[in-house]
Image (cartoon, helix red, strand yellow):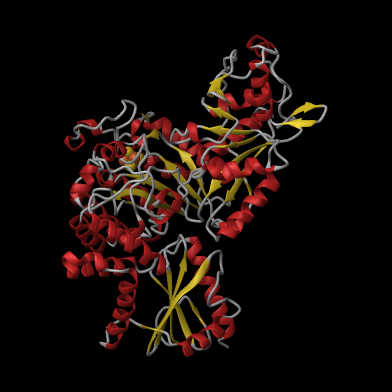
Amino acid sequence: MGIGTGKGWWSLRDFQSFWQKAMNLGLVGPILYKKRMPTPRCSADQPLAILTFHSHSDRSFLDDRELATLSGALRHEQIANDLVLVAITGGSQADAADAERNLAELLSGYDPIVYERVWDPEVVARLRDQLPDKTFIGLRGEHELLDDAPADIFCNGEPKQVLAPLVAWLRGERDLPPRGALFRGEQGWRESDPSAPVEVRSFPYAPNLRPVILNRDRLPESRTFSVTGNEGCPYQQDARENPLYAGTEIPQRFGRGCAFCTTGNHYAGRPNEETAASVFEQIRYVREQAPELRLLVLKDQNPFGYLTEVVERCAAESVSGFTLLLETRAEWFLRNAGRFARALQVAGESGIRLAPFLVGIENFSQAELDRFNKGIQAETNFEFLETLWQWKDRYGDALDLGHAAFGFILFSPWTTMRDLEINFAGIQRTRLDRLRGSILLSRARLYEDTALFYLAQRDGLLVDEFESQADDASRRYGYYPSRPWRHVHSDVAHFAALATELAERNHSRDMLRLFELLLSAFREAGANWRELTAHGLWQRYQSEGTRKENRGDRQLAPASEEFLEKFAALIAPLPIQGDFAGGWQIGGVATRPGRVEVEMCHAEEPAVRLELVPRGDGPYLRRSRHYHLRAIGKDLNPSQQRAAETLVDAIVANDR
Ligand code: SF4
C-alpha cells in the first residue's frame, strides 16, 4: 500500500511516522488529520488477498470456512479477492523459506493482504519486509492476540461487516474509515477519530470454495470444508464452580466449558428444524458448486437433535457421495445412540458416510479429566469407544473411522506417572491409538482465554520458554502460539522429553509399544529414572523387536541390508529413502519366512502397513507375479490410500 509522493510511494508506516513527526513539530494538527484523510491508500486495480496459513499436511483441524465466507461476502460487494492458501511448514526449513518466497511473489499482485490465523507473527513480519508497499490487515481469530498482530490495521469488528467499508476507505472511495478498524500508531492501536458506523448488511451463503493454493503438494489431496450447525458449545460448565479451581482468577468472560477450550464460552443454539434446513442447504450448495469437496465437517458440538433428519433429507434429494465429519462429546454420542444408529442406517443405503472426527476423549484418568473440567467420567469414555467399535462392525462403511482424530491430552502440567499408567491401559483397552495419531506427542496448550491457563498460573507453572521446540504443541500443529508451561513432576517431564525424542526417531510409528517401553523402563529404574536416555531406550526398543522374533513371536525381524537392496529394486522408481505420494516414506521393512511387512510413514498421518505374502488363497488388494499384496488394517484415509496404491503399483510393475 502506498501514498503517492514526488519521490515514489510511501508505505502506511512511513506515512504514519511522517505524520506523527509533523504533528510533533506543530506543522499539522489532529483537526487536519480528521479533515483530510490520506487517499488513496490501496490501488483499486489490485484484488485483495485473504491469506490462510496451514502448517501441516494433516487432515487439518484448521478451519477456513469463515475466511471462505468472508471471501464470498466481499465478492458479493464487488471487491475482487482470492483466498490464498499456503502450507508454510510440513517440510524442511528450506521448503518453508521457499514457500515464503513464492508467497511473497504471489502476493505482490494483491493489496491489501488480510490474514487471521498465524502461529508465528514472524512469518507475517518477514512477508511485510518483502512487501513493504502492501497494507496488512489482521482479523480477530479464535484467540485475542491484538498486541502480537504484525498488521498495519486490525479488524476488531465482524470482518464481513467491517472489511468492505475499510477497503473502500483504503481505496479512497469513502471519507471515513469504518468503526471497528484499529490502526497501529506509536502509542499502540487506536480507532480513527472520527470513524463512521458500519451499516449492517446480510449476505447470501456463497463461500469461495476454490482457493488459490500455493503449494498443493504440501496439502492433502482431499481437502475438507466446514458447514455450520450451531456456533459455540452447549457444554458450559463453569470452571469457577469446580473445587479444583479454588483460588484461580479467571476473567469473567472466560472459564466455561472444558478448561483447555474457548468454544464453551458461548453457544448460540437454533431450533432443530431451522438448523437442519440450514445445514442441508449448505451441504447441497457445496456438493453442487464443488463436487470435489467430499469431506464436509459439520461444525456443531451437539448435532444429534437434527443429524438424522439432515441425512434423511440428503438421501431423499439425492445429495450424496460425501462424508460428514462430526465433532462432539462422547456422552452426547451415547445419549443419542438410537438416533445415530438410524442416521448410519440411512447413510449406508444412500452413499453417505458419517465420520466421528474430533471427539474429545482427552484422558482415561479421572484426576486429569476433572482438572480439564471435562464433566465426564472416565467410564463413559470407555463405554463410548466400545460402542463405536460395535457400530463399526454393524454398519461397516457407513461409519467411517478413517478420519478420526480424537482429542487426547497425554501431558498436562500436572500429569503424574500414575496418570500415564492409567492412560496406557485405557488406550490399549479401547484401541484409541487407531483413532488418533501421535499419542506420545499430545500436550496441553495454554492460552489466556482458557481456564487451564489460570490453573497453571495459580500453581506457578507458567514459564517464559518451553524447554525445547519439541514441547511446543502449538508450533508443531500450526496453532496460535501458546504459553509455555513446566511439569509439576520432574520424572514426568523427563518421560515426556524422552517420549518426544523416541517418537521422532520412530517417525511417530508404533506409539503404543514405545509408550509401554517407557513405562516399563521407568518402573525398573525406580529412583534412578534420571539415568534413562533416549539412546539407551532406542537400542532397547530395537533389540526387543529382534528378541521377540527369535522367540518365534509374531513380531517380524528388521530386513537385512541384502534384502533391502532387493526391495529397493522391487519398488523402483520409488525411493527407499525419500518422499513419494505427497510426503510418505518407507519407514521400515520387516521379514519372516513367508511374509514381508512394509511400513510407510508420514510426518502427520498415521502409518500404513502393507503385507507381501506368496500368492495363494486368501484376500488381497492386488497381485503381482509372486505376491499377494494386502494393506493391514481397515479404513485407510485418502492420503494413506494413495500411499498404499503408489507402492503397490510399483511392486506390480516390477515383479513380472
Ligand atoms: S472441548 Fe468440546 S465439549 Fe469441551 S467445551 Fe470445547 S467444544 Fe465443548
Q: Is residue 516 above or below residue 127?
A: below
The residue lying at 69 percent from left, 17 percent from top is 37
Give residue 470's quadrant in the image. bottom left
Give the left or right position of residue 491, taking residue 50 as reference: left
The image quadrant where one finds ligand 1 is top left
Query: Where does residue 61 sit, x and y in percent of width and height?
Result: 45, 48
Residue 210 spot, x, y in % from top left: 62, 45
Q: Nearer the viewer, residue 339 or 267?
A: 267
Residue 31 in picture, x, y percent from top left: 65, 9
Quarter of the rendering containing residue 49 = top right
Furthest-top residue in view?
31
- Asked whether, in this view, residue 343 is left or right of residue 477, the answer is left
Q: How many marks?
A: 0
- The correct choice, above or below, for 149 with respect to 62 in the image is above
Q: Position of residue 372 (x, y in %)?
A: 26, 43
Above-or-below relation of 565 to 266: below
